[in-house]
Image (cartoon, rainbow, N blue to C red):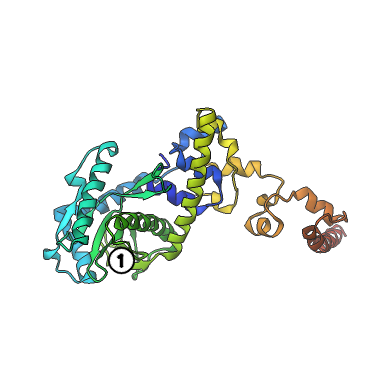
Amino acid sequence: MSLAGARGIVRASRIPTCARQAVMVVDHVKELEFYRSLVGEDFRGEYGERVSAHRRGTAFERAAFDNDAAQLKAALAPRFGYQPEDMWARNFAEEIPGPPTTMRAARLHRLSLVFRDLAAGRRVPELLIQPQLRIPVRPEAKYFEYIAPDFMVLDRERRIYLPGELKSFAERDGVASRADLDLPRRQAGVQVIALTALADRVGLSERVDELAVFVYATPYGLKLGPPHLEEIRAECREIRRAIIQLAAVHDRLETLRKIEDTTLVNLIDEFPADYQEACHGTCILAGPCKEAAAGTARELGDEAREMLGPDMPIERLIELAEGATPASPLEQELAPALRDAAAVLDALQARRAA
């Protein structure tokens, strides 16, 4: 699976201080192949979306989009002041099928025409299914990513489209699991920023707000639940932080490849990792990076790395606990607490021995 599009940007937003992960996104690596080339063996953990979850998600989208998006219209119409039968829907996947290499630019062009009509006050579809956006990562357009929301719905009050996410996991009593919400909210953050870029081209960027629509399944099969209109300001902020990192590593990678045009595996040491607890379950290189961080405060967890500094050697902490002279203001602050902790541990060990 390639680290491209919204998936890659979302990944970078979870650990925006890690240049190594960011450059993997920039280079659109295929993670399993990259891991094998870097580590010299196959990745042994779980990877990717489970087949059952993928099948359910595909079936959920199909149910939402079938029959001119009848079920999706019925879910959205009451929230946005429409009658389902009056909603005009355009399905970009049906209008322009084909492989990504050919259809993305064509769908983006067609969506641009819709936005021109919107800016001119002409009637536009109330519902856009699988439209195509593009998010700029560098201002000179050397690097951008294509972004495809599941749908966009026209908010008549704001006179702008809102990006929408369809997720097949079930909500109960109108609430979805918090563990399930992080990914779609970050994906929507990417979409809002991409939407703003397109709206800016036709003078509508002031209408865009950091809002998105989420539609989850009910506990009863693949029926769509009511839509949730939510602010995603924190997620948009995280995506912007990630874009700054992606732009920087893209520039660095370009510079290195002008010197030597080679694969990323041969250049990866030029991009430092930032191992932390969030790496597990996020990045395929969490294991190797943990091994590289052995013997430092990073190995002790996020709270320790924040308090001690990520590169503080554990051996130095032991020396301070045993009475070594502090060599910095931080060590002067740490030494008394470490000595007290060591004394407590010694007393406990002596009591157990007795």
In-image side of 89 versus 19 (left or right): left
| Residue 124 makes an appearance in the image | yes
Quarter of the figure that contains the C terminus? bottom right
Badge count:
1
| Residue 64 makes an appearance in the image | no
- Quarter of the image where one finds residue 212: bottom left
Few, some or many C-alpha atoms within 10 Å of disc 1 (few <14, some 14-19, many ≥20)?
some
Return the residue nearer the eye: 142 or 294: 142
Q: Residue at x 46, y 56 (%)?
A: 240
Label 1, secondary structure: give it. helix
Return the residue nearer the eye: 129 or 217: 129
Return the residue nearer the eye: 200 or 9: 200
Return the residue nearer the eye: 80 or 222: 80
Position of residue 160 measured from the top left corner of the image (x, y, whole percent) = 26, 64
Looking at numbered disc 1 in the image, what kind of residue is underneath it?
Answer: Arg
Residue 25 versus residue 260 in the image, above or below: below
Quarter of the figure that contains the N terminus? top left
Q: Which residue is disc 1 drawn over?
A: 207
In-image side of 334 versus 234 (left or right): right
- Quarter of the image where one finds residue 170: bottom left
Position of residue 21 measured from the top left corner of the image (x, y, whole percent) = 52, 44
Position of residue 199 measured from the top left corner of the image (x, y, whole percent) = 30, 58
